[in-house]
Amino acid sequence: MVVGMMWQFVVSLAVLRHELGSLHWPSLKRRIWLNLPRDPRTGKARKVLFLWVVPAVLANALGGYLALRLDAVWTSFLPGFDEPPYAKLQVLADPQFQGQWWILGLTVTSIVFNYILGEELLFRGVLLPKMAGVFGRWDWVANTVLFGLYHVHKIWAWPSMIASSFGYAWAAKRYRSMWMGVIVHGIEGYFIVLVVAILAGWYP
């Protein structure tokens, strides 16, 4: 999975270089909306707009919670596609993993390429700014659905995956800033605390 997200970074750079002719930093930043959030009415960049990540995060949490039952319905039609035990973070809560700090290195690498250089760069930096040409005002919805379906390795959670991801694309599109998606998505990175606790043996 981590190697796949690294590959997303390579693909993103290849697409951007082909489109722009080079990876000249100012042009690259404009293309992927790597700027402060912009006021939808005036187009002016305003730091205070970062506060909109709060309702975006809450909307994701609510959407994911409400869709959990849909996950159960979804998997009932797909025998054998239930969440496997190895996919749960809880399996790390085992004495054999205590002191295995290489896992923390893998976790940090995953966070970097998941929330910044991999998924967010590809979906909110490369794809979203161009999707209005096909999907119009619903580009952020299409981006979210595409993002959810891309998680084939979590096929058992497709409904909740999609429902808990609308905040990423909505915030990035409305305020034309990839940073909005990065922050909203990056909230998930809290699990690094759980990983550290497990590796250090701070669990019952």
Image (cartoon, rainbow, N blue to C red):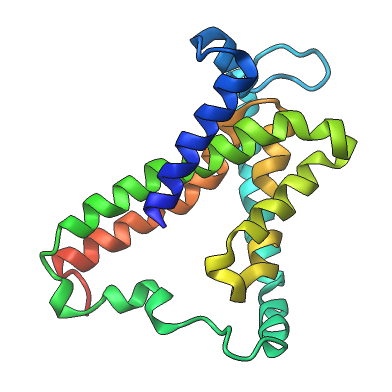
**Residue 32 placed where, x, y %?**
61, 24
Res. 118 in view: yes
Residue 59 versus residue 176: which sits nearer the camera? 176
Q: Position of residue 63 (x, y in %)?
A: 70, 62
Q: Is residue 23 above or below residue 193?
A: above
Q: Position of residue 164 (x, y in %)?
A: 65, 59
Q: Is residue 146 above or below residue 79?
A: above
- Residue at the image position 10 percent from the left and 65 percent from the top: 99
Q: Quadrant of the N terminus?
A: bottom left
Q: What residue is shown at x 39% (from left), y 47% (from top)?
A: 111
| Residue 168 position in % (x across, y down) | 64, 44
| Residue 164 in view | no
Q: In this rendering, would 90 be left or right of 72?
A: left
Classify 115 as above or below 23: below
Q: Name which residue lies at 57% across and 89% down.
A: 80
Query: What residue do we see at 61% from left, 31% from top?
Result: 125
Q: Residue furthest left?
A: 99
